[in-house]
Image (cartoon, rainbow, N blue to C red):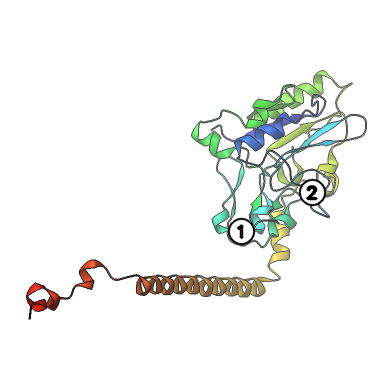
């Protein structure tokens, strides 16, 4: 896997076919049919089963939205148990086995990306992971969404190469592009960049000027450090509840097993006692 992988999205080339959406779903084992949007859900089309989406804007612009894989991700900083991690290569990945379901990551993300499995009995936080496992193992040489694009609207490579390509396009076609690379330095920089003929600052909760170039983790902990004791207490409570439930389930299983054993008919060997042989019967 290349170091510091990056996706360059060119809004001027996107035809809105959603081949990237389909490829993402198939590669990551997500349902091909989208569930009806939850009441109050974001209109960007992202969900726990839809990790990339095409947002259609006025003027015919099609803008792909996905996790931006920040260089210093606020979601990672906000997660108290390390369920979200920034990999050495660059993508931000998720470990369901560690997640507490607190959803701090959803509140911390400046781009509103992570989605929660509201309809699951064992909910997780879901988002794009840039096909990290597939790339690391060599099963893919680029994210599935990039390979699937028929219009070459997404390009994949090392971040410095993608920045150079973006700069070349802006330089060659100043009449077409706004002279800006989105993601270059917002909140410390991201691994998903955009060049466009329309302003795409709305992809964040606030535009780039408001977000600024400073990484967010320091600001995240300014808020989180105010509630450490409450969180530790809640963590201890959740751990205790889990232990009680697990113990009850184990004891119930043992009791059911013992009950079945007691109710089972005796075996042929057990039904014939040592004193019931032919010699005893003839006496």
- Give the quadrant of the C terminus: bottom left
Give the x, y percent position of residue 119.
69, 56
Q: For the residues marked 1 and 2, what is the alpha-carbon distance in whole angstroms? A: 19 Å
In the picture, measured across the screen, residue 113 lies left or right of residue 247, that is right
Q: Earlier in the sequence, mark 1 or mark 2?
A: 2
The quadrant where residue 226 appears: bottom right
Give the x, y percent position of residue 17.
77, 28
CA neighbours of label 1 inside 10 A, class few (<14), some (14 to 19), many (20+): few
The vertical placement of 210 against 179, above or below, is below
Q: Residue at x 68, y 68 (%)?
A: 225
The vertical placement of 256 against 139, above or below, is below
In the picture, measured across the screen, residue 249 lies left or right of residue 211, that is left
Give the x, y percent position of residue 68.
71, 42
Which label number is shown at residue 122? 1
Closest to the observer: 32 or 166? 32
Closest to the observer: 6 or 276? 276
Closest to the observer: 251 or 276? 276
Give the farthest residue toward the right: 59
Q: Which residue is mark 2?
A: 37
């Amino acid at each position: 896997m290349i170091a510091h992988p990056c996706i360059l999205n060119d809004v001027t080339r996107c035809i809105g076919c959603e081949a990237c959406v389909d490829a993402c779903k198939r590669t990551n084992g997500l349902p091909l049919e989208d569930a009806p949007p939850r009441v109050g859900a974001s209109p960007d089309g992202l969900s726990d089963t839809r990790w990339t989406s095409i947002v259609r804007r006025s003027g015919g612009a099609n803008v792909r939205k996905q996790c931006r894989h920040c260089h210093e991700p606020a979601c990672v900083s906000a997660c108290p148990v390390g369920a979200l991690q920034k990999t050495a290569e660059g993508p931000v990945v998720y470990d369901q086995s560690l997640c507490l379901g607190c959803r701090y990551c959803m509140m911390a993300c400046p781009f509103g990306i992570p989605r929660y499995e509201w309809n699951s009995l064992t909910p997780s936080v879901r988002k794009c992971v840039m096909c990290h496992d597939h790339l690391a193992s060599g099963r893919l040489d680029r994210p599935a969404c990039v390979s699937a694009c028929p219009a070459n609207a997404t390009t994949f490579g090392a971040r410095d190469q993608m920045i150079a390509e973006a700069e070349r396009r802006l330089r060659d076609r100043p009449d077409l592009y706004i002279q800006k690379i989105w993601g270059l330095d917002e909140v410390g920089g991201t691994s998903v960049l955009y060049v466009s003929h329309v302003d795409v600052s709305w992809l964040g909760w606030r535009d780039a000027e408001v977000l600024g170039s400073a990484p967010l983790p320091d600001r995240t902990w300014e808020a989180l450090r105010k509630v450490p004791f409450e969180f530790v207490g809640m963590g201890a409570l959740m751990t205790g509840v889990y232990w009680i439930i697990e113990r009850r389930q184990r004891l119930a299983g043992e009791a059911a097993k013992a009950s079945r054993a007691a109710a089972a008919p005796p075996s042929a060997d057990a039904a014939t006692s040592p004193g019931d042989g032919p010699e005893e019967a003839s006496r």
